[in-house]
């Protein structure tokens, strides 16, 4: 009987130890993922006191943005994916392929093919921005500013037409160096066979990551933006698979010519829903 | 037996601990099941650039502080039943600013355009005929006011920035706060830029707003039992007696309710009234003006532009209130109204576009 009690005691002790180990391991795993972002902070040897960004990350970002702004013209092709959080909370990802051609200081042509098959195009010729939707064969024109920077700001802030990849198209990329509240150098990372430096930044309303190619051409090869203040924290991901830094461009590609049968439609803006002012009855 | 019993109990306890722990982890990830039906593909207007992420995206640059009397700023939006539309086509109602501007010296061009506008504007409500000089004087006054306001605001912001820097310096709030201050400065910068640019830019581009419609609602899609109607070379969509057109909104093609397009035909009209204007008989049904024609022995009603100056008892419920240079208008698609009558008996007069 004593033996049975002894064995029972040993078994209970074992169970207790296993249980404790189990609970001990789980929080460690969870905490491990939570600490992932902190790993590099421990590696940081210096932090820019004005921005809170790791100096190595900032240096790479500076190098990448300087290189990009130094290009008078370029063409890039990429694959993008964006999360759309449904009313139910379910998060769906929709993809697109994109080709963007930029001629500084005031020319852009962009084409996006959505995964549903529709093609959307955008022309900016220094005076007018044109949006075209192929499936409907409709377009709209908006008089805009005479620089890329003002025009993109204008489209995003006034027309609420956000283009997350637009960050790479501005003539002045210095705001990217000022926006981060903190930043880390995550480490070396291979995108296929391309060796990159993986950078991670934190902002007020979003976090983002850049993968910058190592070597003479510090091209941004991948972008991930996490909109952490939006429900479901959706992400935008873009793989910039092809950069042409010396494309042959004619001004014609930045000019819109309506396809046959295309109809110009209005762009509309909404008014404030302000019941205090009373509605038109 | 007891050993087996104890082992079973232990196994059950361990498995329970596994499930409980797993549930806790899952709960962190959140859940949410699909409700079926169509899925939204639109990410909305919130997923923007990194560089502008410091801005409050709900902020509108049409705020009354910068342009209370230009494009009308805010208007009331009438309640709109969305029961004709699917879950993806719910009415989107949100504040939207209309434009920003740049500071350029185009006074001559502006004056010409102002003159053109003066010529085309017919406002029979009050019969006023504005003189260009008066308009110029008013504009000069407004520009002076705007400049003063801008300088005041910039002064306030400068002071605020100075205080913030001092606060950071004094209290050693750390790098995070310092970084936040930089971020806020950029927001201020963008705010200043649009505040400064908007008015001048709008003066240059007001004419462009002839093609704009600022409706109460726009819809992602139409799920009502709609028909496609060709009027002239243009394709429209019709659900019952309500017409829709395609428009760009937030960079994508949406649908918007419009007035019955000019040239559309009807064999008969519901609850029509007649009106004689300059010897011509108009038939009015559901706020739409028709003329009667005879074709192949049959009478048809064809939509025409409403005669300016006509007084009507009511306007479409989704007409949007706008203000242009201090005057209040109600816009429904291409038709503009102004209030008339007395407080006891409000009526509306159809006027020319104030843009």
Image (cartoon, coloured by chain):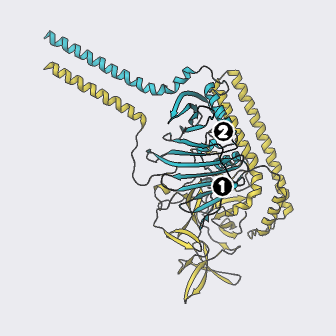
In the structure shown, which secondary structural element does the residue marked by tag 2 occupy? Answer: helix
Q: Quadrant of residue A129?
A: bottom right
Q: Which chain is cyan?
A: A
Q: CA distance from mark 1 to mark 2?
A: 21 Å
B170 vs B91, left or right, is right
Instruction: Where is residue A139? Give x, y as percent.
Output: 61, 60
1 or 2: tag closer to the N-terminus: 2
Q: Is residue B353 visible?
A: yes
- Identify which residue is drawn at 74% across, 59% down: B206
Q: As displayed, is residue A133 above or below residue A149? A: below
Residue A58 drawn above or below residue A151: above
| Chain B as rendered: colour | yellow
Q: In front here: B32 or A190?
A: A190
Q: Which residue is mark 2?
A: A68
Provide the chain ID for the residue under circle 1. Answer: A
The quadrant of the image that shows the N terminus of chain B is top left
Q: Nearer the viewer, residue B243 or B149?
A: B243
Whole-percent x, y for residue B280 in the image:
67, 83
Specify the subunit that label 2 lies on. A
Respond whether the residues carrying marks 1 and 2 are from the same subunit.
yes
Question: Is residue A143 at all visible to an observer of this figure?
Answer: no
Q: Going by the image, does B36 lie left or right of B7?
A: right
Estimate how packed mark 1 is, as few (under 14), some (14 to 19) or many (20 or more) residues with alpha carbons within 10 Å: some
Residue displayed at 42% across by 36% down: B29
Spot the residue most to the top: A2
Instruction: State the mark number for residue A253.
Output: 1
Which element carries disc 1, helix, strand or loop?
helix
Count of number-bearing discs: 2
Give me the residue at 81% from left, 52% from top.
B142
């Amino acid at each position: 009987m004593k033996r049975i009690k002894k064995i029972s005691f040993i078994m209970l002790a074992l169970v207790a130890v296993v249980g404790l180990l189990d609970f001990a391991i789980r929080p460690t795993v969870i905490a491990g993922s939570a600490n992932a972002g902190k790993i590099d902070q421990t590696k940081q040897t210096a932090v820019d006191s004005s921005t809170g960004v790791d100096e190595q990350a900032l240096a790479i970002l500076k190098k990448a943005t300087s290189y990009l702004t130094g290009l008078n013209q370029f063409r890039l092709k990429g694959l993008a994916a964006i999360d759309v959080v449904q009313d139910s909370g379910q998060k769906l990802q929709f993809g697109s392929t994109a080709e963007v051609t930029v001629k500084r200081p005031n020319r852009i042509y962009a084409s996006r093919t959505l995964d549903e098959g529709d093609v959307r195009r955008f022309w900016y010729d220094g005076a007018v921005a044109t949006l075209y939707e192929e499936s409907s064969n409709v377009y709209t024109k908006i008089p805009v500013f005479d620089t890329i920077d003002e025009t993109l700001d204008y489209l995003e802030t006034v027309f609420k037409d956000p283009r997350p990849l637009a960050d790479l198209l501005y003539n002045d990329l210095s705001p990217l160096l000022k926006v981060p509240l903190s930043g880390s150098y995550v480490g070396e990372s291979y995108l296929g066979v391309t060796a990159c430096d993986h950078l991670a930044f934190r902002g007020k309303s979003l976090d983002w990551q850049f993968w910058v190619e190592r070597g003479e051409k510090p091209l941004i090869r991948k972008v991930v933006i996490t909109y952490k203040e939006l429900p479901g924290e959706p992400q935008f991901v873009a793989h910039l698979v092809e950069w042409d830094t010396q494309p042959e461009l004619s001004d014609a590609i930045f000019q819109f010519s309506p396809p046959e049968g295309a109809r110009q439609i209005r762009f509309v803006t909404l008014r404030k829903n302000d019941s205090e002012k009373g509605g038109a009855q | 037996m007891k050993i087996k019993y104890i082992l079973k109990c232990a196994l059950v306890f361990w498995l329970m601990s596994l499930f409980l722990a797993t549930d806790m982890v899952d709960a962190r990830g959140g859940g949410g099941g699909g409700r079926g039906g169509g899925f939204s593909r639109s990410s909305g207007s919130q997923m923007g650039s990194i560089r502008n992420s410091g801005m409050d995206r709900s902020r509108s640059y049409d705020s009354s502080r910068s342009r209370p009397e230009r494009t009308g700023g805010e208007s009331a939006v009438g309640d709109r039943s969305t029961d004709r539309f699917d879950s993806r086509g719910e009415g989107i109602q949100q504040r939207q600013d209309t434009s920003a501007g740049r500071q350029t010296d185009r006074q001559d061009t502006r004056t010409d355009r102002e003159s053109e506008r003066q010529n085309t504007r017919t406002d029979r409500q009050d019969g006023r005929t504005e003189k260009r000089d008066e308009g110029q004087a008013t504009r000069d006054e407004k520009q002076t006011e705007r400049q003063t306001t801008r300088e005041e605001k910039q002064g306030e912001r400068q002071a605020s920035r100075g205080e913030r820097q001092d606060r950071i310096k004094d209290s050693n709030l750390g790098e995070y706060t310092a970084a936040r201050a930089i971020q806020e400065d950029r927001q201020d910068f963008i705010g200043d830029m649009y505040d400064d640019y908007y008015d001048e830019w709008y003066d240059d581009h007001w004419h462009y707003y002839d093609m704009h419609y600022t409706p109460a609602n726009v819809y992602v899609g139409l799920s009502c039992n709609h028909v496609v109607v060709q009027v002239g070379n243009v394709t429209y969509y019709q659900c019952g007696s309500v017409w829709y057109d395609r428009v760009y909104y937030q960079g994508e093609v949406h649908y918007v309710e419009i007035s019955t397009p000019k040239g559309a035909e009807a064999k008969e009209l519901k609850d029509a009234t007649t009106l004689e204007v300059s010897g011509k008989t108009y038939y009015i049904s559901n706020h739409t003006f028709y003329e009667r024609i005879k074709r192949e022995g049959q009478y048809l009603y064809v939509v025409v532009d409403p005669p300016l100056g006509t007084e009507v008892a009511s306007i479409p419920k989704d007409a949007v209130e706008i203000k242009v240079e201090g005057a209040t208008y109600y816009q429904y698609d291409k038709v503009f109204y102004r209030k008339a009558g007395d407080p006891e008996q409000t009526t509306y007069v159809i006027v020319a576009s104030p843009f």
